[in-house]
Amino acid sequence: VEGRVGILIDGLPLGYLAPGVLGDFLRAPQDKSESWMLATVLTLLRYTCMLLTLLLPAAAAAQSPVTRAQFVAALWTCSGAVPYDANGPFSDVNPNSPGATAVAWAYDLGIVRGTGGTLFVPDRPITREEAAVLLRRYAAHLGRDTFLPSGVAACNDFEGISPWADDSLYWAAGIGLLAWGADGRPEPQGTLS
């Protein structure tokens, strides 16, 4: 109890010690009254459960690819998440869905154009080339320079890049918005996570 303050609140049958450290919260008074082996097993079990509780959600989130709607929502959030009418032109975007406002906002600014017809396909993972095109259009909307840095695409390696994506993937990688693939190539069909 050295260096701590006890807090007692009138009417409550318990008290608090401050400051508390993580190890304090993982011990129970019963640990001292049981055998040392059982107390050790219970403490290890508590630490294991705590680590699993903290780390598993992050590991699962890192594995899932970013969807098209999530990516557009991130751009909208970077722009200040301005209030906007969620009723957009895409028939597959429900106005009550989480990314609907962002998709309608991005469409009206010319950042997104859909995948054909009146479709946006919000739940499909976004490809690197799609992300690069959206980033370049967003940068142009903000008035930023969207010219390709000199020498970036000197190798003219446009293999696998869709014609509508032009040199946007090289632009995004050249200015550092997207990393190059593992082999130093653009990997246009790769996903983001």
Image: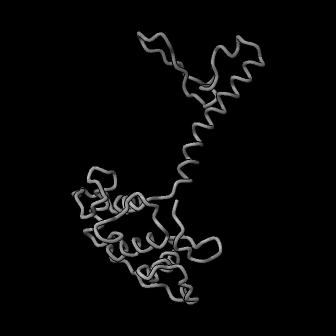
Residue at coordinates 39% horizontally, 71% vertically from top-left?
A: 134
Give the answer, above or below, for where 48 lies relative to 158.
above
Q: Residue furthest right?
A: 37
Q: Where does residue 64 sit, x and y in percent of width and height?
A: 52, 54
Quarter of the figure that contains the N terminus: top right
- Residue in the foreground of this view, choosing between 160 and 106: 160
Give the answer, above or below, for where 137 lies relative to 30.
below
Q: Where does residue 68 sit, x and y in percent of width and height?
A: 41, 62
- Residue in the foreground of this view, choosing between 89 and 102: 89
Q: Where does residue 193 sit, x and y in percent of width and height?
A: 52, 59
Q: Where does residue 173 sit, x and y in percent of width and height?
A: 52, 75
Q: How many marks?
A: 0
Residue at coordinates 37% horizontally, 74% vertically from top-left?
A: 139
Residue at coordinates 21% horizontally, 57% vertically from top-left?
A: 85
Give the answer, above or below, for where 136 lies relative to 30.
below
Judge left or right: residue 95 versus residue 49: left
Residue at coordinates 68% horizontally, 16% vertically from top-left?
A: 31
Give the answer, above or below, for where 96 lies relative to 122.
above
Q: How is the image coloured?
A: one colour
